[in-house]
Amino acid sequence: MLVVEDDPGIATQLVRGLERAGYAADSVAMGAEALRRPPSDVVLLDLGLPDVDGIDVCRRLRADSDAAIIVVTARGEEADRVLALDEGADDYLVKPFGLAELLARIRAVLRRGQRAGGGPAEVLRHGPLCVDLRTRKVTISGGEVALTPKEFAILECLATDPGRLISRQEIVERAWDEHWYGPTKVLDVHLAALRRKLGDPTLIETVYGHGFRLADRPTQDAD
Ligand code: CA
């Protein structure tokens, strides 16, 4: 992990907290230094840096690396958050924040990275359903189901963590590749089509007012 932070007190605290949590961590105080470093898995990025604006660092890191970028800043305005997320930040945390929350956000971005980067969970299996993240093929009891990119993204979101209730907002944010500030109704159309194609209306459960999850059921052997 790389901490990009010009306040030495905060930088030291963050590095110590990360190390205590079992991560290898280092810090730099300048944006230019951060860009010269070999790629890290996660970059915690302060926006108010002495040499370059953190947003520029964010943009350039995103262009050059697969690092997960969590912006950690005192700038809490919505416009700042939108800008950082649009420039490639994976998450955004406003100071002051607790270490427990930061660690939870780090775990979340690492989980997402594993999916996208072809980590261990390349093929998600759940009951008769099989979702191959590398080839983007979906099968139900061995029979292939052709999905649109949006339908696939929604299913991927649900299948990554089967049984967990996932809010409409989270699905929309993850499946639409950007943070979605509008109504989440757009999801319903795609979800209805997805359910129809999967052929088993009970596979995706609706929890009214909360969200969706994959129904809990044991994985079957393909026959
Ligand atoms: Ca600063």
Image (cartoon, rainbow, N blue to C red):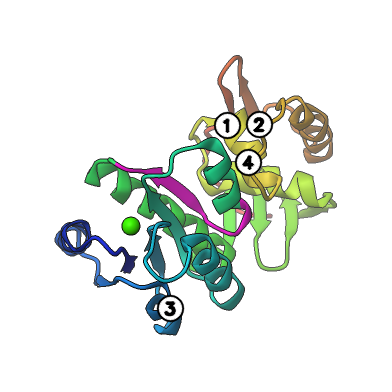
Q: Nearer the viewer, mark 3 or mark 4?
A: 3
Q: Which residues are magenta?
A: 86-95
Q: Give the residue pinned by disc 4.
A: 173
CA distance separating discs 2 and 4: 18 Å
Q: Give yes or no for contact between labels 1 and 2 (Cβ–Cβ under 8 Å).
A: yes
Mark 3 residue type: Ala
Q: Give the residue pinned by disc 2.
A: 204
Classify residue 31 as left or right of residue 99.
right
For residue 172: magenta?
no
User: Height in image: 120 above or below 166?
Assistant: below
Earlier sequence position, callout 3 versus callout 4: 3
| Mark 4 element type | helix
Classed neighbour count for the residue bearing mark 1: other residues with Cα under 10 Å, few (<14), some (14–19), many (≥20): some
Residue at (62, 26) in percent of width and height: 205
Classed neighbour count for the residue bearing mark 4: other residues with Cα under 10 Å, few (<14), some (14–19), many (≥20): some
| Mark 2 element type | strand
Classify residue 65 as left or right of residue 38.
right
| Mark 3 element type | helix
